[in-house]
Image (cartoon, rainbow, N blue to C red):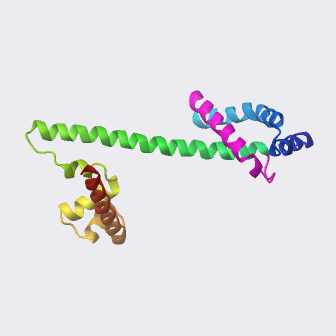
Amino acid sequence: MSDEELGMIRQAQHGDRLALAQLFQNHYSFLYKYLLKATMDPQLAEDVTQDTIVRCMEKMTSYNGSSSFSSWMITIATRLYIDRLRRRSREEEWIRREQGMRSIRWQFETKGEEWSDVLDALSRVSSPQRIALLLKHYYGYSYGEIGKILGIPEGTAKSRAAYGLKQLREEMKMDD
């Protein structure tokens, strides 16, 4: 890192907005190109670049110089991108579950079968807990058998079923 950049960083840390703007302008292209390669999506790369700049502005005083400024920015950018991927994955899972629930409800209703509030609440319990809960309380398997079916320890099967039951109860209370 050059003395000039180090001076600019120190000025930015002490509230010099011009130094801060110049610092980010100097690193913007590098950061964007990195994220473009990481995301393979120009719009997402642009969004994460902007989010990174904002986060760096918020955390500017925490930069301690133990790594290069660009490495510090890349670390922040990578974490933001991973968080966004996790959030997107959870959102996609929720959408799939909602669509599946509507489809199952429609199948029940077209066959003249009742779609109960319990099934509605059960659809909102996370998959690992829902499966353990069904195997234990609906189909009557032991925790050892559930563990074998799911390839998990018996204790994990027990905790998933218990947590699933707790989630189901909470969902049922919310429906009241």
Residue 172 picture location, percent across and down: 25, 54
Q: Residue lying farthest left?
A: 112
Give the overall secondary structure of the magenta segment: helix
Number of callouts in the render?
Answer: 0
Please give the name of the residue rendered at 55% of the width and 46% of the height, measured from the top-left corner.
Answer: 83
Q: Quadrant of residue 108?
A: top left
Residue 122 picture location, percent across and down: 26, 52
Please give the name of the residue rendered at 27% of the width and 48% of the height, measured from the top-left corner.
Answer: 123
Please give the name of the residue rendered at 28% of the width and 57% of the height, measured from the top-left corner.
Answer: 168
Residue 150 picture location, percent across and down: 32, 61
- Residues drawn in magenta: 41-68
Is 9 situated left or right of 116 in this image? Answer: right
**Which corner quadrant holds the N terminus?**
top right
Q: Residue lying farthest top?
A: 42
Is 61 a magenta residue?
Answer: yes
Residue 94 picture location, percent across and down: 37, 43
Please give the name of the residue rendered at 62% of the width and 30% of the height, measured from the top-left corner.
Answer: 46
Is 92 a magenta residue?
Answer: no
Q: Residue lying farthest right?
A: 3
User: Looking at the picture, does residue 147 appear above or below residue 47?
Assistant: below
Q: Quadrant of residue 96?
A: top left
Q: Residue lying farthest front?
A: 176
Is 56 situated left or right of 15 in this image? Answer: left
Q: Nearer the viewer, residue 116 or 38?
A: 116
